[in-house]
Image (cartoon, rainbow, N blue to C red):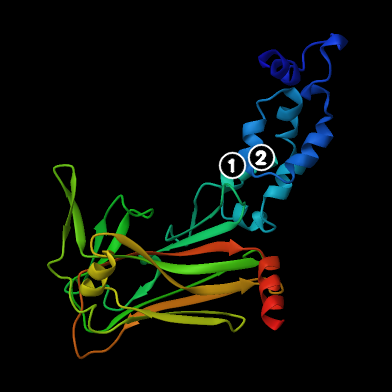
């Protein structure tokens, strides 16, 4: 059996008695198959033989793996970073974070799906009272992709707003806030959490919302700190980074740009709240436009 497998993968032999091998498959045929595989799968198969390696480097294959707006992402980079590169190398460049807007925002493509993802730092958002050190402070940390988070000590009017405009490819996207209850630090190499300022999040829910330039809206409410309920369900939010999903929106591709606005607020001034870290907002692709159309069709039926 081992000998048979060796014969299949060996494309160097000229002995016809050895039978057909993978090396006999035309490179164009292999490239056609690769069109239906994910980038990691293509890279894994590239080592089989010369034909597979050639197909795995084909521009026609990797052009299909890139998002339709990949040139918009490249425009955020200096030309010397991508001029003259093959499409495979362009994919590799774009799969790494591309900072923009004073490094407060990042774009990249998913290594498996090739879809566009985005993250916005707390520094890239409007935070009420952020300039007053009595309320907020910036905390450097390696737990954030932006290496800094906004820490709230105490405030009455809690509001965080943000917006971004970009040419996103058609598809379904979700938006979420990344939040941490309590402060944290490293002491003697160990992560230590501090809940000295954590209060007020169990009294009233925080309202999250998003809207798009074509009229889509979504909103929801969460109690950020409900210790009794969490303990009864075996869940604990304190001391962990939690992603709070705000909602979903659809990009149809009919508009050249999509503007997305979002907010997180608790503006009931009957009580104060504090002890919260705000890291970032993530905009992630969760489906193709075809998925949305199928879902809409089913709902009509």
Q: Quadrant of residue 279?
A: bottom left
Considering depth in this image, is 259 or 46 the residue closer to the camera?
Answer: 46
Q: Residue at x 50, y 81 (%)?
A: 218
210 on left or right of 178: right
Q: Is residue 263 above or below residue 193?
A: below
Question: Label 2 near label 1: C-beta < 8 Å?
Answer: yes
Res 166 visible: no
Residue indicated by mark 1: 92
Q: Residue at x 58, y 81 (%)?
A: 216
Residue indicated by mark 2: 88
Instruction: Provide the secondary structure element on which disc 1 rests.
Output: helix
Res 193 visible: yes
Name the image quarter holding the C terminus.
bottom right
**Residue 142 in picture, x, y percent from top left:** 30, 49
CA–CA distance between discs 1 and 2? 6 Å
Q: Residue at x 66, y 31 (%)?
A: 45
Name the image quarter holding the N terminus.
top right
**Residue 212 in picture, x, y percent from top left:** 56, 78
Q: Is residue 210 above or below residue 241?
A: below
Q: Is residue 15 above or below residue 230?
A: above
Q: Quadrant of residue 161?
A: bottom left
90 on left or right of 226: right
Instruction: Provide the secondary structure element on which disc 2 rests.
Output: helix
Badge 2 local density, few (<14 within 10 Å), some, or many (20+)? Answer: some
**Residue 4 in picture, x, y percent from top left:** 73, 16
**Residue 282 in picture, x, y percent from top left:** 46, 63
């Amino acid at each position: 059996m081992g000998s048979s497998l060796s014969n299949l993968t060996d494309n160097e032999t000229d002995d016809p008695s050895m039978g057909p091998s993978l090396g006999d498959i035309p490179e164009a045929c292999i490239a056609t198959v690769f069109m239906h595989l994910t980038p990691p799968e293509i890279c894994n198969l590239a080592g089989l033989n010369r034909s597979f390696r050639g197909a795995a480097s084909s521009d026609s294959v990797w052009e299909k793996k890139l998002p339709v707006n990949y040139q918009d992402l490249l425009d955020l980079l200096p030309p010397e970073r991508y001029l003259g590169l093959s499409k495979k190398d362009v994919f590799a460049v774009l799969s790494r974070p591309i900072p923009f807007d004073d490094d407060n925002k990042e774009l990249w493509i998913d290594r498996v799906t090739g879809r566009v993802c985005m993250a916005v730092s707390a520094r890239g958002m409007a935070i009420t009272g952020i300039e007053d050190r009595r309320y907020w402070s910036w905390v450097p940390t390696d737990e954030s992709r932006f290496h800094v988070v906004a820490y709230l000590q105490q405030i009455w009017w809690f509001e965080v707003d943000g917006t971004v405009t970009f040419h996103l490819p058609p598809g379904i996207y979700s938006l979420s806030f990344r939040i941490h209850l309590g402060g944290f630090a490293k002491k003697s190499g160990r992560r230590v959490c501090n809940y000295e300022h954590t209060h007020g999040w169990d009294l009233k829910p925080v309202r999250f919302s998003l809207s798009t330039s074509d009229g889509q809206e979504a909103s929801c409410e969460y109690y950020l700190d409900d210790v009794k309920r969490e303990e009864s369900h075996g869940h604990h939010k304190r001391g962990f980074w939690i992603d709070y999903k705000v909602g979903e929106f659809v990009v149809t591709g009919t508009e050249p740009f999509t503007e997305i606005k979002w907010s997180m607020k608790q503006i009931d001034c009957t009580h104060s709240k504090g002890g919260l870290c705000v890291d970032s907002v993530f905009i992630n692709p969760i489906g193709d436009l075809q998925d949305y159309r199928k879902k809409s069709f089913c709902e009509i039926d």
